[in-house]
Image (spheres, rainbow, N blue to C red):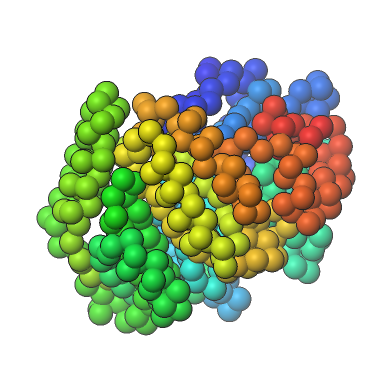
Amino acid sequence: MTWRNWSGLVSTEPTDVVGPRDVEEVAAAIATARAGGSTVKMVGSGHSFTAIGAPTGTMLTPGGLAGIRSVDRDAMTVTAGSGTLLKDLNLALERLGLSLHNMGDIAEQTLAGAISTGTHGTGGQAASLAAQLVGLELVTGTGEVLHASADDNPDVFEMARVGLGALGVLTALTFRVEPVFVLEAQEQPMSWDQALATFDEMTATSDHVDMYWFPHTDRMLTKRNHRRGTDLSRSRPLNRVKAWVDDDLLQNTVFGLLTAGANRVPRVIPRMNRFAAGMLSERTYSDVPHRVFTAKRAVVFREMEYAVPREAGLAVLAEARAAIDASDLRISFPVEIRTAPADDIPLSTAYRRDSLYLAFHTHRDADHLDYFALLEPIMRAHDGRPHWGKVHTRTAADLRPAYPRFDDFLAMRDRLDPDRVFTNPHLQRILGD
């Protein structure tokens, strides 16, 4: 079979396909591949834009490792199979009266894929899913099953929270959870100057802030989220009709048609963006967290995202805008701006520094190469760290200075996967061989 990722940028032809139903079958598949000098990759839902999870030898499918394994209400933790989709975990937690603290705006990923690539939301006490982990189960390149947490194999736990799929196959993940709460979203259009002038105030007074700048315009859309307690009767979801019109019809169907058409006539894009930004209106709604954090993304796109130091973030955004304005590129997708508190995960993009994320998108049928090539040097000049699951051109040689514990990660890789059972060409590029 041919495996393809969601964006269509990557395709491979694995030599074998195995659908393990438990950790023992994962270990057996790894042992077989190792004995034959081959490789193994557990694929997720393909939402990484890079080839980080592309299988070249045996492909393990995740469906047999899905679902909630256990709930510990005293410790406030939930353990789920690594093949569980984030959207399914969210629904299961809601039924249990529980929630994750934070998450990104797409919920189609498997838990293992989202953890391994550093998937994150914005703001909060912890932005990434990996920073909400308290334990994991991992099958190493020698077939050993390890359970890791802060108390059990803590050195493995430290590194494997963002492990890039290079340390082993994740089979179960334990998250810290909390009682489900009401999250209120206030969406408000602003001018560029107003958004930048009030950004620090917004992030200081809101639990989560997300902004979108429409290229070739002076307009921003801001989204501020506030926690409103655990009384779910106080939630005020969007009217179903309005939600369908705004989020399904306009943001997906109409937006998809417009951007697809604009690919053929790029000169209309600035006018299209100005029109779209001018149609934005303020709205406030509240619901359980995952219905506020996540959104449907039906329009296929390509993405590059970099984390830069928080204190330099707005200046980097302004520099990126100046480069776009000075170029002859026509960009139809908004630029997304988010923040994250520092964490202690060695290969996290927020390792030991508060960070601001800048995400650049193009329609799948538009040429993303020139756009990303224009902006990546700006991100690198400001000590930017690329999202592991999104398009970038970095290699082990220039990633090492960006991560103080890069060599510690490589040493752990040597220990857990000495025969490189989990490697592929992309990992060879970003980690060396």
**150 versus 259 height, above or below:** below
Residue at image point 62% right, 54% down: 382
Splitting the image into 4 quarters, where does residue 152 fall? bottom right
**335 versus 122 height, above or below:** above
Whether residue 128 can be seen here:
yes
Q: Position of residue 322 (x, y in %)?
A: 43, 48
Q: Is residue 275 left or right of residue 107?
A: left
Give whichever of 26, 87 is nearer the camera.
Answer: 87
Q: Is residue 395 left or right of residue 369?
A: right
Residue at image point 70% right, 29% down: 424
Give whichever of 405, 424 is nearer the camera.
Answer: 405
Q: Position of residue 185 (x, y in %)?
A: 30, 69
Residue at image point 32% right, 68% down: 194
**As drawn, which residue projects farthest toward the front?**
326
Q: How many marks?
A: 0
Whether residue 92 can be seen here:
no
**As drawn, which residue projects farthest toward the left?**
241
Q: Position of residue 326 (x, y in %)?
A: 41, 41
Quarter of the image containing the C terminus?
top right
Give whichever of 62, 183 is nearer the camera.
Answer: 183
Give whichever of 69, 416 is nearer the camera.
Answer: 416
Q: Position of residue 43 (x, y in %)?
A: 58, 35
**409 versus 210 height, above or below:** above
Q: Is residue 223 left or right of residue 414?
A: left
Residue at image point 45% right, 27% down: 8
